[in-house]
Image (tube, rainbow, N blue to C red):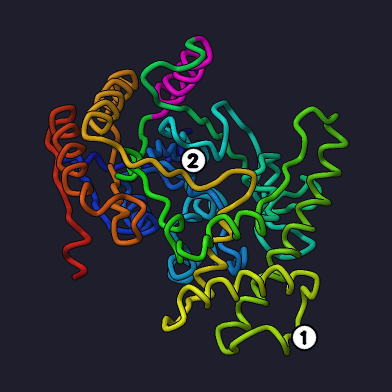
Amino acid sequence: MDRKPRLRTLKDLPIYIEEDHHEVLPHIFKNIGAKHLPLENNTLVHFDSHPDMLIPKDLLPEEAFDKFKLFQKLSIENWILPGAFVGVFSTIVWVCPPWSHQIAPGEYEFQIGRNKLSNTLAVTCLESYYISEGLFTIRSNLDHVKDIKLIVIKLEESPESQTEFKDQLMRVQEQIAEVDHFILDIDLDFFSTLNPFVTLYSEAGLYQKLKDLYTFNPVPQNLEYSAKIEMALKVGDERRETLDKLESIFSYLTTEENLTMYEGPGSDLVGPVSMLVDSVRKHYPRQEIDWALVHDAGTTFDDSELPHHISSQAEIQTMLRLTEQFLDWLDKAPTIVTISRSSCDDYCPQDQVENIQMGVLTLLKMKFRNVTEHYCYKEEN
């Protein structure tokens, strides 16, 4: 006997448009609550220049099941995997533009669960994206485990390997063919992307100084599996410790003029941070420096940088055309669409966002019937 609850068919295809990307998750939850989407094992097709697949540092595993606490702790880079931990997503298709390199194209199967050693969420994925955040652990350290399938596909005019691209595209097509419902999620910075930290206190050369201080040396890909696991655990712990030290130092600077009297963790890093501080203060003597933001900028470095590619109008049109082709290949309408503008935090250029949004909505209304747009970001103002 089939005990799966019957889902209610939506007459229209709703498009929820938000400013910050994590604000789309409540719309997904609402549609699950209204039985328009399955309670669990949804497929998310995620167009974005960024994976958004980290985990909030202060989110306890049990808090993920309380949507009010969950929504309060999410931010733009970490809203997807908590949804996977509570079972809402089991398959994530990250469609990225040519200038995104955080996770290489391919298919990844891994687990997310509660790390029994730290009572935090962790994953078994051996990508630098996770190791550099201290989020990697081995399966035996986890309980309350959920499986995740991640397919990464790079959407570009002329892929370096047509064969690999077609194989990845076939896997996406097969995944969508297997499900009755999927969520289409589009960040407008997919089409044109700023790294807002590139120009932060630029007269002091801050970006390069942070790169030297924070960049992470990845685990070599050619290691045997057991050696790779061992090294990933070791460098993940070291990286987490380094980031905690740097956070402590920069937190101290929010109330103190310099580090002369600093006695917290990270004494080995006080020297290079002091040089950075002196340079910034020299070039910005009358400005109150946001040291917490400086640290946040530093944490964006692992073995790669945040993507930075301000597209020309012709490039935006090319990406819109490739998006249309991709949706044609899927040959199935999503149940809901979520869109994030990402303009207030400068990830999508503010002078381009309206034009890109108009292009995306025109494409969706041309491709799908009975589209209803919800300009949620306007309602909040």
In reply to whether residue 178 is colored magenta, the answer given is yes
Image point 34% across, 54% down: which residue?
24
Residue 48, quarter of picture: top left
Write down the residue under mark 1. Answer: 263
Give the SS element for disc 1.
Answer: loop
Image point 40% across, 21% down: which residue?
177
Left/right placement of residue 256 relative to residue 126 reads left
Looking at the picture, tell me which residue is in the foreground, 98 or 89: 98
Q: Residue furthest top?
A: 163
**Which residues lie in the magenta part?**
163-179
Q: Position of residue 36 (x, y in %)?
A: 30, 45
In the figure, 356 relative to 81: above or below?
A: above
Predominant SS of the magenta segment: helix
The amino acid at mark 1 is Glu
Mark 2 closeness class: few <14, some 14–19, many ≥20 residues within 10 Å: some
Looking at the picture, tell me which residue is in the foreground, 373 or 301: 301
Mark 1 closeness class: few <14, some 14–19, many ≥20 residues within 10 Å: few
Q: Nearer the viewer, mark 2 or mark 1?
A: 1
Give the SS element for disc 2.
Answer: loop
In the figure, 219 relative to 25: above or below?
A: above
